[in-house]
Amino acid sequence: MSLTRINRTMVSSPQCYRGFTLVELLVVISIIALLISVLLPSLSKARKQTQAVKCLSRCHQLGVGMTLYLVEYDVYPPHQVFLERIDPETGKKKRVRWFNAMANLLNTNEKDTDRVQSCPSVPNWVVGRNNSYGYNYKYIGSYRGNMCTENPFYPFERFPVKNLRCPTKTIAFADTDGTGWLHDHNNDFEGDNWKDPLGIGNHGYVLDPTFIPVWSDQTWSGPPDDPEYESYAWHDWRTYLSERHLGRSAAVFCDGHGEMVDPRVAYWDNSMWNGLGVDPMRILSDSETHDADPTHTHHPLYDMDPHDTTRRAPSSTQNQQLPMRYPELGL
């Protein structure tokens, strides 16, 4: 064998590596961008659904607190009461609102109160007057003064309420946007515009129903020595359910169960607000026998919910400054 003979197996030829061309890179980048555009909405929707589930769980906790209050005091909680002692922050009588009562009953400290009683979708909203959850005060517990002697709850607007005919269909607490949505949200005592009626969340701790009771036109709010006329949540401005959970609002009902509610369904009539499970005036207006039978003067439950016939006060400044939230409903 020749010494000059080379064993080819002992010689390693250099490996050749081929990189991506510009066109191939652009194709890969385009595919990745397409996948991201497809997946991001799904991920965003999944995140919002998770927040909705958390919100519904927190509403359930409020339902537990309301049940504890009802068991202990044999009455649904008032939306607020005034104590005799003076609040050093306001210089007026100390105000105790429903969420203060819930915090005491649920044994939550200040940090836990914000976690339990505020919607996770708006974590910057502090529990207070401009709250993320509102209370169905007009039909469950309004401690406001009322001057209508025909009101069965006189001298209060609607207190005490000890029982409801249909608690399973009556909203107790739900997500709220307050009176407005054109301006940014401000927490209580935050800046100069924390009472801005156009601000989202303004006076959100109470929720107005579809139609307010007829005697609400003679209602006043505040301490007895400093009353303010207030037919709706904030003078003549009504508050609204929120649509922040994919077009729906998390709500807990008076029997303690929670569910997602479509505001357009809730605002069709008063059946989800008045504690009756039906709206007697709506039944009368839709009844074909009403005109045919003169003896059919009114629904047997009519006297339990005589309410206004407009969803938003015609003379309210809200009509001039804020477009309707649900124009198809006149609201």
Image (cartoon, rainbow, N blue to C red):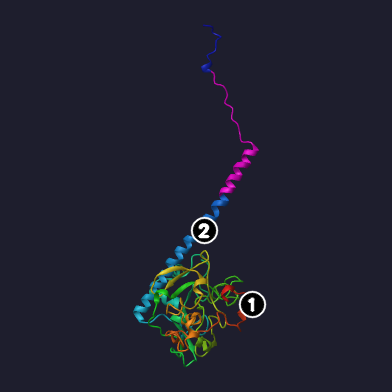
29 magenta-colored: yes
Residue found 50% across the figure and 61% down from its top: 48
Q: Where is residue 252 in the image (x, y as percent from the top left)?
A: 43, 71
Horizontal side of 194 relative to 63 (left or right) equals right
The image's mark for residue 45 is 2
In the picture, residue 162 is in which quadrant?
A: bottom left
> Secondary structure beneath disc 1?
helix
Q: Position of residue 31 (x, y in %)?
A: 58, 45
User: Quick one: label 2, few (<14), some, or many (20+) residues within 10 Å?
Assistant: some
Residue found 34% across the figure and 78% down from its top: 71
Residue found 59% across the figure and 71% down from its top: 181
Q: Which of 100 and 259 is in front in this view?
A: 259
Q: Nearer the viewer, residue 55 or 292?
A: 292
Give the position of the C terminus as an image quadrant: bottom right
Q: Where is residue 62 in the image (x, y as percent from the top left)?
A: 42, 72
Q: Give the range drawn in magenta.
A: 11-35
Residue under pointer 1: 321
